[in-house]
Amino acid sequence: MKIRYTFLAILLLMGCFLGCNQVKRPNGLPETFPVTITIMQDGVPLEGAIVRTAVENTALAQWNGAGARITNASGKTEMYSYGFKGLIAGEHKIVVNKEICHRPPDVTDTVMYDEYEFFVDQKFWSANTTPLTIDVQSGTKAFTLDVEPFDPKTYDVRKFGKKLKK
């Protein structure tokens, strides 16, 4: 009898672990297709870049939930939509940024003294200004995109509110 209850308890636990942790697909989410994006800068993979997408079709704008992904040492990242691997079909704007915040060691409770080091030109920071686009269709796709380095001469601290590292 004890073995029977142990067996039932194990089955119950397996059911919870296998079935309870699954992400539920949002109603109406179109099919997603695997997409890998590689970010290059001056011919070198850009590690640690933040990559986001924005679908161009306004009828599908509600599915702009791909979230931010971070590139690895090879400059690559796999894209996801609402926890599901891939992106929905169509044209996507690609937004890329990489920044490091430098805070003086004696400052712990304010951002007033933070200084930022940027690595990607500011035109790539927004879906409104980025020239990068990809066209996702069925099947696995790999895209390699080039970004320009940050140019401090074009940076407007009033627009972005972040001081540059000296």
Image (cartoon, rainbow, N blue to C red):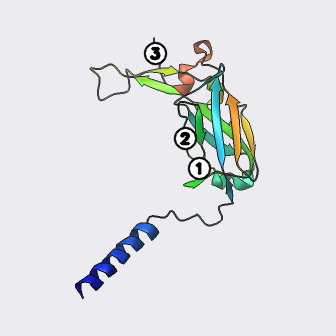
- The mark lying in front, picked from 3 and 1, is 1
Residue at which label 2 appears: 69
Q: Position of residue 145 (x, y in %)?
A: 69, 31
Residue 126 appears in view: no
Mark 1 neighbour class, 10 Å CA radius: few under 14, some 14 to 19, many 20 or more = many
User: At label 2, which amino acid type do we have?
Assistant: Arg
Up-down relation of residue 91 to residue 23 (above or below): above
Quadrant housing residue 114: top left
Mark 2 or mark 1: whose residue is earlier in sequence: 2
Residue 165 has which mark?
3
Q: Tell me which label, 2 or 3, sits earlier in the chain.
A: 2
Which element is circle 3 on? loop
Kind of residue at disc 3: Lys
Return the mark for residue 80: 1
Q: Position of residue 103 (x, y in %)?
A: 36, 22
Q: Residues within 10 Å of mark 2 (few under 14, many from 20)?
A: some
Q: Quadrant of residue 91?
A: top right
Determine whether label 2 and label 1 are within 8 Å by CB. yes
The residue sitting at 40% across, 67% down in the picture is: 17
- Distance between mark 2 and mark 1 Cα atoms: 8 Å
Horizontal side of 130 relative to 17 (left or right) equals: right
Q: Is residue 49 above or below residue 16?
A: above
In terms of depth relative to the viewer, which is nearer, 133 or 43?
43
Which mark sits nearer the N-terminus, 3 or 1?
1
Question: Looking at this view, is 100 or 158 the one in front?
Answer: 100
**Callouts 3 and 1 close, C-beta under 8 Å:** no
Task: Give the image location of residue 42, x and y in percent.
Answer: 65, 19
Q: Residues within 10 Å of mark 3 (few under 14, many from 20)?
A: few
Query: Which amino acid is tagged 1?
Result: Tyr
